[in-house]
Image (cartoon, helix red, strand yellow):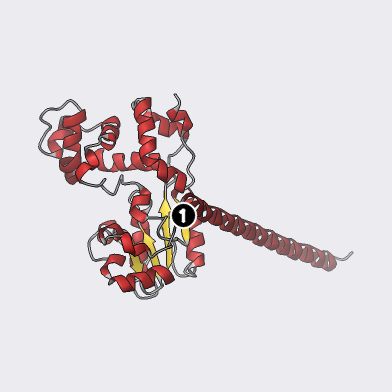
């Protein structure tokens, strides 16, 4: 066989290999998309089952105040409603919603500062519309939310708000925790003094605060630790997409594809979450088992609605 024939055969074999590889990758991509679709349908079916099929028997706005709708962000341009939950990738999703309201070509969401998207009036809220217009948008727009393991979300909230130099959260929450549960009859008057003295509420102090009946007697939980279902009302609003923090990147890509935006915008990359059972246990080891059980009851609806496994190892020590 001549050299030219050998080269021709090798070229044909190489081409066949590339075609087969391309088919394999396409097949794997389709399998992955199919699995994500099934997972999404399971999440929505679970909500329907847990909510008892009560959604929208009468209009959801009939019994809801504007205050209860303050977490719903509207993108008029693309017909999207996003219910944001603090400590569940909400800064990055707000960046995406902000960018989508600008002119094309869209900016990289990561070029938008987190401070900007958390400022008032930077994003359009559903409750800024008259009631009749809210109803139209809730009926016709694509609605989505992202959720997270409730206990892991609490750990994230504690780390962010009480292990950092945050004057607002110190004055409005941490001082009371130190006074009521931390054995400090007269806590420092500023976060700088407290940190200089090595004083900050422990994670257990935070849990004691959440479990104290007096905490919610007059004022609802602060949004960073308010139950997710109380922020987004999934038994009243029929969401078209339910994302999980634990599968954030895959879910974000799938959602943008559903919205036909995957070619024009990319969801910001996220760091892997340290959510191993051992990591969670390290945080809860200082919390008495009875308090853990009460905490689970406080967040049980979130666990059940969104398909998170009851943390038996923490509750049955």
Along the horizontal axis of the image, is 283 left or right of 42?
left
What is the x, y in percent for residue 242? 46, 56
In the rendered image, the vertical position of residue 208 relative to residue 7, given as above or below = above
Q: Residue at the spot x=25%, y=34% of the render? A: 212
Q: Residue at the spot x=42%, y=33% of the render? A: 279
Q: What is the count of numbered marks?
A: 1
In the rendered image, the vertical position of residue 254 relative to residue 180, given as above or below = below
Quarter of image, res 82? bottom left
In the rendered image, the vertical position of residue 250 relative to residue 129, given as above or below = above
What is the x, y in percent for residue 67? 25, 58
Along the horizontal axis of the image, is 304 left or right of 230?
right
Looking at the rendered image, the quarter that the C terminus falls into is top left
What is the x, y in percent for residue 267? 43, 60
Q: Residue at the spot x=46%, y=34% of the render? A: 311
Quarter of image, res 159? top left
The residue tagged 1 is 243
Nearer the observer, 166 or 16: 166
- Look at the numbered disc 1 and give the secondary structure of its residue: strand
Nearer the observer, 159 or 224: 224
């Amino acid at each position: 066989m001549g050299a030219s024939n050998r080269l021709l055969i090798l070229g044909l074999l190489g081409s066949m290999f590339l075609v087969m590889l391309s088919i394999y990758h396409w097949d794997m991509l389709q399998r992955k998309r199919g699995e994500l679709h099934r997972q999404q349908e399971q999440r929505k079916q679970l909500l329907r089952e847990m909510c008892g099929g009560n959604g929208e028997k009468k209009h959801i706005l009939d019994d809801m105040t504007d205050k209860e709708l303050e977490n719903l962000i509207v993108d008029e341009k693309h017909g999207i409603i996003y219910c944001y939950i603090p400590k569940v990738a909400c800064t990055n999703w707000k960046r995406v919603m902000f960018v989508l309201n600008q002119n094309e070509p869209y900016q990289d969401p990561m070029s938008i500062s987190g401070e900007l998207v958390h400022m008032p009036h930077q994003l359009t809220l559903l409750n800024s519309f008259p009631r009749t217009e809210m109803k139209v948008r809730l009926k016709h727009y694509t609605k989505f939310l992202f959720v997270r393991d409730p206990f892991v979300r609490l750990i994230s909230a504690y780390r962010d708000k009480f292990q950092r130099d945050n004057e607002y959260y110190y004055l409005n929450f941490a001082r009371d925790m130190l006074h009521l549960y931390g054995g400090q009859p007269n806590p420092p008057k500023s976060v700088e003094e407290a940190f200089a003295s090595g004083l900050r509420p422990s994670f257990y102090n935070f849990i004691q605060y959440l479990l104290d009946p007096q905490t919610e007697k007059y004022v609802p939980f602060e949004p960073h630790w308010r139950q997710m279902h109380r922020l987004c009302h999934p038994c009243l609003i029929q969401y078209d997409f339910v994302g999980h923090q634990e599968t954030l990147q895959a879910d974000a890509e799938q959602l943008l594809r559903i919205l036909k935006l995957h070619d024009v915008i990319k969801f910001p990359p996220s760091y892997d979450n340290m959510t191993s059972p051992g990591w969670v246990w390290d945080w809860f080891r200082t919390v008495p088992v009875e308090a853990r059980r009460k905490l689970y009851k406080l967040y049980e609806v979130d666990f059940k609605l969104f398909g998170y496994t009851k943390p038996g190892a923490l509750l049955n020590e």
